[in-house]
Amino acid sequence: MIKTDILIIGAGPTGLFTVFEAGLLKLKCHLIDALPQPGGQCSEIYPKKPIYDIPAFPEVLAGTLVDNLMEQIKPFEAGFTLGERAEKLDRQEDGSYVVTTNKGTQHQAPVVVIAGGLGSFEPRKPPIANIADFEDKGVAYMVKDPEVYRDKKVVIAGGGDSALDWAIFLADVASEVSLVHRRNEFRGALDSVEKASELAKQGKIKLFTEAEVKKLYGDEKLEAVVIKHNDAEKGETYLPVDNFIPLFGLSPKLGPIGNWGLEIEKNAIKVNNAKDYQTNLPGVFAIGDVNTYEGKLKLILSGFHEAAVMCQYAYQIVNPGKRYVMKYTTVGGVEGFDGSKKEAKKEVVQSIA
């Protein structure tokens, strides 16, 4: 039995940052993740994807963000159970919980934090009859390593942030990038839409709007796609390609967590965002993309905020009756469980009367 103060289900960015916030409160954490390494989707799906909305980082690769988070939490000596999926949640007589994985590993803690991102997921595939024939032979539903597309002809389908971001990024990597979207308007960030439009004007991206990829051709690997235009006069465009990347998002599934008695709404866990991000089960919290409440924004940034707030309330559960006085890290520094401490820099502030 692995015992800890806070048991975190999900080792993505939000789960990892929870370790830091809990560590400042001298709370020990252990994380469970079905993936074989920490980082969640940032490590598994798009480690080389640039992220633009992390404070103080105009741009940071997803994999680098994970590396930095791992470095940040190092003083707090978190435990990890990786490559195992959380299966069962059982409440004990003392109010704590035991979480058992699919491999039988048991963990006990007074606080359980579900930070599992979208839960388990699978890509949404376009309805193209023979698309499965070309999977791993030119068709991919995510970009893990952009260098795979170096000097290749690439078609990206989709109208969201992922499609726009990768079209922009690969414009400097691939020999030819085509972006296909079934509408005129894109769902992504305005800045990304403007960048893609500018690259299209410069001839670095071929833009096909009000159109869809309908057919794939090739023998042993993908050789061409057929783009069908909504405008009947334009008909179809036959385009020789090396790679086709349909980016229509992920279909989230909560998996076994959905059977734990939690209040679920639209495949996400309802929480009390007015206070502590606690679920309908006492001592069980949900933070990050896995939760839902009015005004929810599915951003890593939001998950970081939720983690910080949640840990303040988790402290009261782990240490009932004990009062914690918050200190800014700029004043108190960061002290790990081994006694090592990063001292805060002393600054002299001069006031002018």
Image: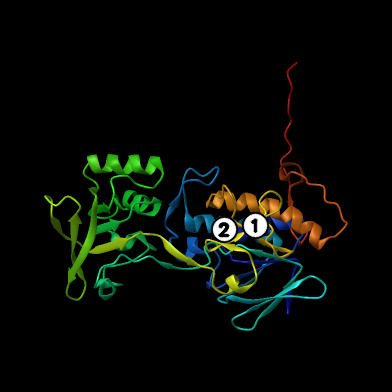
Q: Are marks 2 and 1 in contact (CB under 8 Å)?
A: no
Mark 1 highlights which residue? 271
Circle 2 sits in a helix, a strand or a loop, which is it?
helix
Q: Is residue 101 above or below residue 326?
A: below
User: In the image, residue 274 lies at what x, y percent?
Assistant: 68, 48
- Amino acid type at mark 1: Val
Q: Quadrant of the C terminus?
A: top right
Q: Mark 2 vs mark 1: which is more N-terminal?
A: 2
The residue shown at (13%, 50%) is: 234
Q: Position of residue 329 (x, y in %)?
A: 72, 45
> Which quarter of the picture shows residue 307?
bottom right
Nearer-the-camera pick, 305 or 342: 305
Compared with 27, 330 (above or below) is above
- Left or right, 338 with respect to 114, comes to right
Looking at this view, name the residue that lies furthest to the right.
Answer: 321
Q: Nearer the viewer, residue 10 or 56?
A: 10
Taking the spot 75% from the left edge, 58% from the top edge, the residue there is 314
Q: Residue at x 35, y 50 (%)?
A: 164
Hey, which residue is sitting farthest top in the picture? 353
Per the rendering, the mark at residue 13 is 2
x then y, percent, for residue 172: 29, 50
